[in-house]
Image (tube, grey):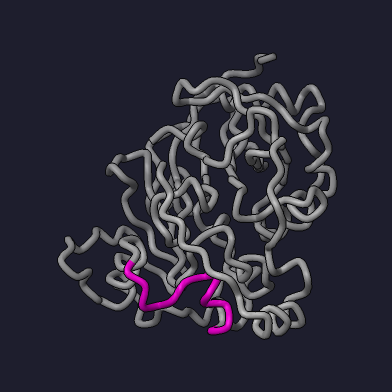
Amino acid sequence: MNAIDRTSDMPRRQFVALSGALGAGALLTGAGGSASAATGPDPVPGKPSCCPCPTDPIPPGGPNPCPPAQMQSLCGLPSDTDPLWQEVQYCTQGIVPPGGQPPDCLKTTPNYVVLHGRPPSPQHFLLLPSCRITGIECPFLVSPNVANYWHEAWETGRSGGDVPVASPNIGLGINSQSARRYQQLHIHMAGVRPSTQLRLQALEAAGRVAPQPSRWADPQYQALITGADGSGDRTYRVLRLDALTQNLFVLLNQNVVRPLGLAMAGQTLIVVPKMTAMGFARSFYVLNSDSSLPSGTNTCDHLLVY
């Protein structure tokens, strides 16, 4: 995807204030560096809110799940005209996009909105915050007050969810700042190929999947996975989690981005629920990549099936 880059520098006074409020790790800065398949068991399937800034977040959210005004230089202004943000405002406040077609609001909650993907498909949807958050680079995403968008994307898109993805193997993904087209945070809810699921299970069986977040950046947990778009193999850091109850943005920042001296803006994240012949195995593979890895990538598009 072609990016619409919109970056701005934070004034020093705001930087100091935010550093004190959130800690040094919350302001996601840093310089991004440049830096055989196996088999396994064949998996089988298993009205609008009144307020754009919700007050009842899903755990681990807190009492104020929208970025404060001093973060707007990094996280976006409510007056911005990004098309996806305007669609969120229509779903949450009834504000019709100027000169645009009102979107089909598939699900609207105090914390997030679900819309069709681009192009519309029964196996591609988008989950977007009800708050103004441009994307993965927004430092509010690593604060204790942010809503758990990944957990909600899984619960919404899974079989039996309110907006289920029409695929036996589901993937959730977010692009880096440079790889995305729109400037409102959106988690893709889409399919993944059965071969991707098999590859991840084979890596886990071979001890090539990090068993805990603190090991996520270890080189032994970097693995090649073949893209669903015919783009060839890409390198990902692979982690296994038993649940999506933790803030994945925090886990990524604390265990990969900061230790390796990378930039949060350059990262992509993909979540693939583990599926076996018995259905959902109650665990998740969390994949991360960026351009610092050999054959790395900063987009989730190579693995997701839209």
Number of on-image labels: 0
Which of 297 and 130 lies nearest the eye of the viewer? Answer: 297
Q: Which region shows up in magenta?
A: 69-81
Q: Quadrant of the C terminus?
A: top left
- The reply, left or right, for residue 102 in relation to residue 276 is left
Q: Tell me where residue 138 appears, x and y as whole percent.
A: 58, 66
Q: Residue at x 52, y 70 (%)?
A: 75
- The reply, left or right, for residue 270 in relation to residue 12 is left
Q: Quadrant of residue 118?
A: top left
Q: Quadrant of the N terminus?
A: top left
- Above or below, 82 relative to 271: below
Which of 41 and 30 lies nearest the eye of the viewer? Answer: 30
- The reply, left or right, for residue 87 in relation to residue 44 is left
Q: Tell me where residue 303 appears, x and y as whole percent.
A: 51, 32
Asked whether residue 188 is in view, the answer is: yes
Q: Quadrant of residue 144?
A: bottom right
Asked whether residue 46 is in view, the answer is: no
- Above or below, 76 relative to 256: below
Q: Quadrant of residue 204?
A: top right
Q: Tell me where residue 225 appears, x and y as whole percent.
A: 62, 25
Magenta span contains residue 301: no
Q: Residue at x 67, y 71 (%)?
A: 143
Which of 203 and 268 lies nearest the eye of the viewer? Answer: 268
Q: Tell me where residue 300 appears, x and y as whole percent.
A: 52, 40
Q: Residue at x 59, y 36 (%)?
A: 297
